[in-house]
Image (cartoon, rainbow, N blue to C red):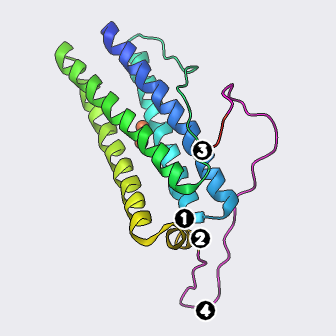
Amino acid sequence: MKGNEKIIVQLNARLAEELTAINQYMVHAEMCDNWKYKRLDETIQKRAIAEMKHAEKLIARILFLEGIPVVSNLNKISIGAEVPKMHQYDHGAEEVAIRGYNETIRLAVEVGDNNTKVLLESILKEEEDHIDWIEAQLDQIKQMGVQNYLVEQIYKAQIPRLGCIVGTIERGRRPAGPSSTEQVLTFS
Ligand SMILES: [Fe+2]
Ligand SMILES: [Fe+2]
């Protein structure tokens, strides 16, 4: 079905934001894995996968509207050198996403594209959940100090009722080698 041109342009802008967030969050998750902050690693990795699903939905919608999904555009990726900075940069990425989805929902209402509106509203809800979690982390850091906060991020092995300690399987380390992205990532 032929879609509205302005909607397709905006969906591609949202897609670029999702692809940027995926890259940023994957690097942050792997940095946390490297430091063995397992709880952070798992949560940020889950968020990266959620953004991947958003990107998939946007691609599917653009194709349905007979547009061309642009998957080669990335915005600036911001990598935090330390955990609080990571949360701040990820907060910024979520703010961009929330602003963008609200803008595209407005346009979808204007041009009468109700299914795009419904799709974007469901994604927007998840972005708000993401920013809510990040804001809670920043509040915790402010309240308990970064060192106390980080102690809580180290994965603790669970002791089941039967009394045997279950070990955890840790993901392998990232292979060394050049980055596939053309952006040179700087840590700040
Ligand atoms: Fe997203
Ligand atoms: Fe998000």
Q: Name the residue under label 1.
A: 39
Distance between mark 2 and mark 4 Cα atoms: 21 Å
Give the position of the C terminus as an image quadrant: top right
Q: Name the residue under label 2.
A: 154
- Of discs 1 and 4, which sits in the foreground? 1
> Residue 162 placed where, x, y %?
58, 91
Distance between mark 3 and mark 4 Cα atoms: 35 Å
Q: Is mark 1 on a helix, strand or loop?
A: helix
Q: Mark 3 points at which residue?
A: 26
> Residue 181 placed where, x, y %?
68, 28
Distance between mark 1 and mark 3 Cα atoms: 14 Å
Q: What residue type is labelled 4?
A: Gly
Mark 3 or mark 4, which has the lower sequence index? 3
Ligand 2's quadrant is top left
Is residue 69 shown to the viewer in this render? yes
Contact, CB < 8 Å: mark 2 with mark 1? yes
Disc 2 packing (10 Å; few <14; some 14–19; many ≥20): some
The magenta span reads 156-184
Contact, CB < 8 Å: mark 1 with mark 4? no
Q: Is residue 72 above or below residue 184?
A: above
Dominant SS type (magenta):
loop
Q: What residue type is labelled 1?
A: Arg
Q: Which amino acid does label 3 sit on?
A: Met
Q: What residue type is labelled 2?
A: Ile
Q: Is residue 173 magenta?
A: yes
The residue depicted at 27 percent of the width and 35 percent of the height is: 121
Q: Is residue 50 above or below residue 150?
A: above
Q: Is mark 3 on a helix, strand or loop?
A: helix
